[in-house]
Image: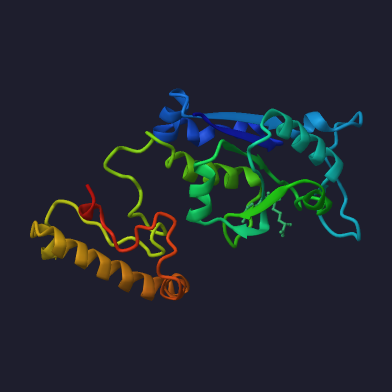
Amino acid sequence: MTFSAQILTLYPEMFPGPLGTSLAGRALEEGKWACSPIQMRDFATDKHKSVDDTPAGGGAGMVLRADVMASAVDHALDQQPDAPILAMTPRGKPLKQARVRELASGPGVTILCGRFEGFDERIFDARPIEEVSIGDYILSGGEMGALVLLDACIRLLPGVMGASSSGDDESFETGLLEYPQFTRPRKWEGRIIPEVLRSGDHAKIAAWRKQKAEEDTRLRRPDLWEHHRDAPDQSPSGARGQKKEDRS
Ligand code: SAH
């Protein structure tokens, strides 16, 4: 099945952009996902093709018109009725790995990319749109956010990542950060790889990794740690504490 991404944007030339290279680029060529950018300006009705207007109540910048956005969204819904419609906005629900997994297991996504001061709020009442934020900072437009979201989904599609990396161990999959990684040379600038990782003892390595993952999460991300402790078995994969070595 092809994961189909429709992107409603004023800058369709930004897609697939960086997602045309590497893992995602190969997957695109292989038809594992499809990329359909749609120019929102095509849904403007006046002779100037305007998509925005000044903010009600005054203030700086411009606001994307609800009527034009609705026409664009309705067109996207016609094309792909089963895909959830997401709008990029810093006011949205912060994107988490669990939601990325859900989206990646579905038919695709339609993503509405904001510009200027964002959207006329009424669009979110009038259409079934999920508002998504990619973090507590402001981008100049939703396109970068859409690329981030798509990259996170695409790597999870069947056959996109190598067989060795199911992704279940990654940071956030278990509600924890991943344990630290090392590779050769064994000794570099006087720093030596933790001895246990060279022991060949898989149980010991798994125990060390679990301990490091917990310790690092506690120190670096107390917010995640608290949540993990309160809800220990809520990982999307149900793989908490389990390491690659434990599986066949
Ligand atoms: N005035 C708005 C910011 C507008 S930024 C506010 O203060 O909330 C312009 C567009 O960039 C937004 O409409 C949105 O589509 C996108 N954008 C900016 N920051 C984002 C973020 N953290 N997550 C997702 N989209 C973002």
In the figure, is residue 170 to the left or right of 104?
left
Q: Which residue is found at the position 89% from the left and 31% from the top? A: 45
The quadrant holding residue 84 is: top right
Q: Is residue 109 above or below residue 230?
A: above
Residue 7 in the image, given as x and y percentages of width and height:
64, 36
Q: Which residue is found at the position 78% from the left and 32% from the top? A: 41
Q: In this view, does 244 lie above or below 111?
A: below
Residue 132 in the image, given as x and y percentages of width and height:
63, 53
Name the residue nearer the viewer: 35 or 17.
Answer: 35
The quadrant holding residue 163 is: top left
Q: Which residue is found at the position 44% from the left and 38% from the top? A: 157
Colouring used for the render: rainbow
Residue 44 in the image, given as x and y percentages of width and height:
85, 33
In the figure, is residue 229 to the left or right of 128?
left
Q: Is residue 35 above or below residue 101?
A: above
In the figure, is residue 98 to the left or right of 59?
left
Q: Is residue 59 visible?
A: yes
Q: Is residue 189 visible?
A: no
